Image: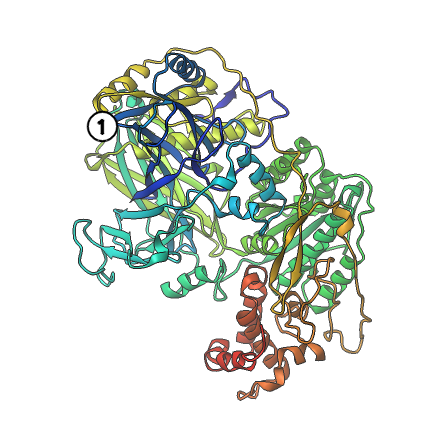
Amino acid sequence: MFNPQIDSTENSNENKEIKKQRHPIIICYDSTTKLPIDLKQVSYIVNIQSGLAVVQIFQIYSTEQNKDQRELEYLFTIDQDSAVTKMIVEIGDQKIYGIIKELEESKKKYKKGIKERKIIVLSEEDQEISNIKKVKIGCLSPGKSLKIQFEYIQPLQVYLNQFWKLELSPLVDISYLTVNGLKKTYQGYAQQYAFVKHHIDIQAIKLNYKQNITVIINMQKPITYAKSPTHSILLNSDINMKEKQIDLQTPQNQLIITLDTNDPENMEPNKNFELLFSSNDINSPDAILSHTKNEALEHIKYCATLNIIPKFNEFQIDDAYQSYINGLNLPSQTKIQKGSYIFLIDRSDSMEGIRIEKAKQSLILFLKSLPDDCSFNIISFGSVAIKMFDIAQAYNQQTLYQAIMQVQEMEADFGGTDIFLALKEGIYDENYQKSKDSTETLNVFLLTDGEDSPKEIINLVIQNQRPETRIYTLGIGNNCSEYLVSRLAEVGNGKCLLVRDYEDINSKVIDLLEDSLTYYLKGFSLIHNIENVSQIIPDPKSITQLKKNQQLTLQILFSKKHKKENLEFKINCYDPQLNKQISFEIKMNLKSSIENEYFHKIAANRLIRYYEKSISLYAKQMDMIMINQKFLKDQDIINLSLQNQIICSKTAYICEACKNQKVLQALIKKKLLISKSEEEDYQTLEGVANAKKFFYKKCINNSMEIIETKEFVEMDEDSVLHSSTQSLQYDQKQPNRLLPKQSIQFALKPKILQEDYQMLSYFELIDCIQANGSFLLEIHIEEQLKLCKLDNKYRLQDIYWSTVVSLFYLELFCQDSKSSWQLIYNKAINYLIKQGINFYQIKAECISDYGKIFKNRKI
């Protein structure tokens, strides 16, 4: 078994861009007029199996009134981890079945069909944005009805390691329509809007149809919990039974979920569908053994799929669900992973203007949200790298104050950008090399516009990679090098987020910090007794960490030559929190194998995506998989796509008229007698880099919620920057009294409407947070909180009571920005708990009374 070398004609392409994701859209339109075709009806049928969902979408379009022959196009998006497995186009009484063929062969066949005026359909993956699929429907005859059915498979998501999550996007993401209406728009949305507008007249989109959804859960574990945060649902144990929904007091091996037709909002076409479901055994390892009858796959006839969701934290199931509703990925009772935090802030000339202000804003929020009992340091870099403190400092009120004061004075005046130097001197120094046996987690946060040469930087991180060291990147600005910051986070065990010049940054800061606080497993290995293994996807050694909200899925594919009936698997890993090795043992029997090609297809899709990703990252070897080949080349990927009948960048669906499914299977089988095709030349679609920069005016109403004006303003980014940094004298006698007041607020300060009464914004309130989690309020803040008007019947000390009331205020009046203050909220609750104060009891008794104080005010 090998981590294969890559032999690809694309590997030398130094200018290859990372394929970007886009918001969901599934739409049919006239390729000439760009007018969308009216959709009459859409139905989803989802079959959930062990670890994956098989999604079928049935659509009926209004085309019977067409008087001329037309060529239509069909645009749809799916997640990168999903694989399209079936496409059927029904025109009148004729069914057109999709068959995967080589891309160029499919294009030639389509052009030939158009010339011969045949009904023919071509579907291919967009060469710039791989999760966008394009379908061309040629020669649609007048008066013919149009029905489109396609199927895809996607892995299930995990939430808090206690739920599986299914998410179905609407056919047209609402963002495409709100951009047209000038609502909640920023640069990223404008680019997406421009991309879609190039193909479709968005103004003509009509959402006059209803969507119906049926979910069938048939896993190997009994389902004990199922709720939808977005829809009213009915639960049943049998799809043919119509009795009143069951309550899951008795676990169900099969569960049928349908929409409640009595709820008029359920069928709305622009509504995202979310479903959370669970089992009492969700944290127990499970496995499924499947096989295929596909003769082209005899060398991987069997597929053993192993799934593990670790138990890091355990909450009451209803509390965990409520955390999801509230947007909390880290509930207050979560045990957190502490360590050392190093912040690298780019102060090069290219960060001048709004970018350095965003970096400062995010850095201060990072600092305020840090857990107690950690250490931290800040490194400014440009053409030089300078540490704020000689060594990392213990996190307390004094060091927090000192750091914020210095951050406020920062400017983009460090010359050029040298991220390599910052990492070399700030992270990978002599002390780092001497601490190889340290178990402390080191969390590094890089705040940059990413304008630097990537190769040397990435190699430095790879050479010094450890599971305990995590590199998080926050790419700032519209022209940030997405490749550099995303690749750094990937090889550094961390996470990458991008923030555009006029996009809110605070929630993304908390997202990164929250990820660094979660528990994890590391050091994975796999032991098994299978002979003739052909593929292991992914290679367990390539998994540096398994964190919260992640499921470990290993797929072992092996030949039909294997004869031993009893199959044994043992997954070993290390738990740094418990400081011990742990193992998961799974046993199966060869005779228990079920015929199911979906697991082979999802494994093939993962291998293809790993291959394409490796090429985009200029890798020479695929460390993510183990296969029984020393080399992988483009033709191997084409063969894999053809054999499994899943689309990739080098293949396409060509839909041909067939009498029935048997004829279709015969065509597929014939196609699987693969001969080597000529190398294909791929052209990258012209991007939307020249899209206009839009900025919309914001103002704040009484409750400090953002509202939009009715005009787009095209502006130079620096013209909107109005720095108003304030500094306060530090009282040496009372070092814990005040923090500087610039902090979280973006430098462009909003105007207040109805100035006779102003509600506090969340960033004004969390300016008062102290390092230990308490809220130390200034007099004018106390007045706006109406602190004295709520009876302190528990006779708590002032510092405790002000903390309690501050939390009340955040919860009642700052829900829209909860993702930005959730870690501070948790930090304050833990502070109260340490003081022996039961916040939840006080909240239950007092928060409604506190809300009534504001009842007569316009919030």
Residue at x 31%, y 48% (from the top left corner): 213
Residue at mark 1: 563
Residue situated in front as seen by the camera: 492 or 258: 258
| Image-quadrant location for residue 89 | top left
Residue situated in front as seen by the camera: 796 or 672: 672
Label 1: few (<14), some (14–19) or many (≥20) C-alpha neighbours in 10 Å: few
Residue at x 59%, y 81% (from the top left corner): 801
Q: Does residue 45 appear to the left or right of 488 in the view shown?
A: left
Q: Position of residue 531 (x, y in %)?
A: 30, 28
Q: Position of residue 849 (x, y in %)?
A: 50, 82
Residue at x 28%, y 52% (from the top left corner): 258
Of the 4 image quadrants, the one containing the N terminus is top left
Question: Type of residue at label 1?
Answer: Lys
Determine whether the residue tagged by mark 1 lies in a helix, strand or loop. Answer: loop
Residue at x 71%, y 78% (from the top left corner): 780
Of the 4 image quadrants, the one containing the C terminus is bottom right
Residue situated in front as seen by the camera: 335 or 693: 693
| Residue 779 visible at all | yes
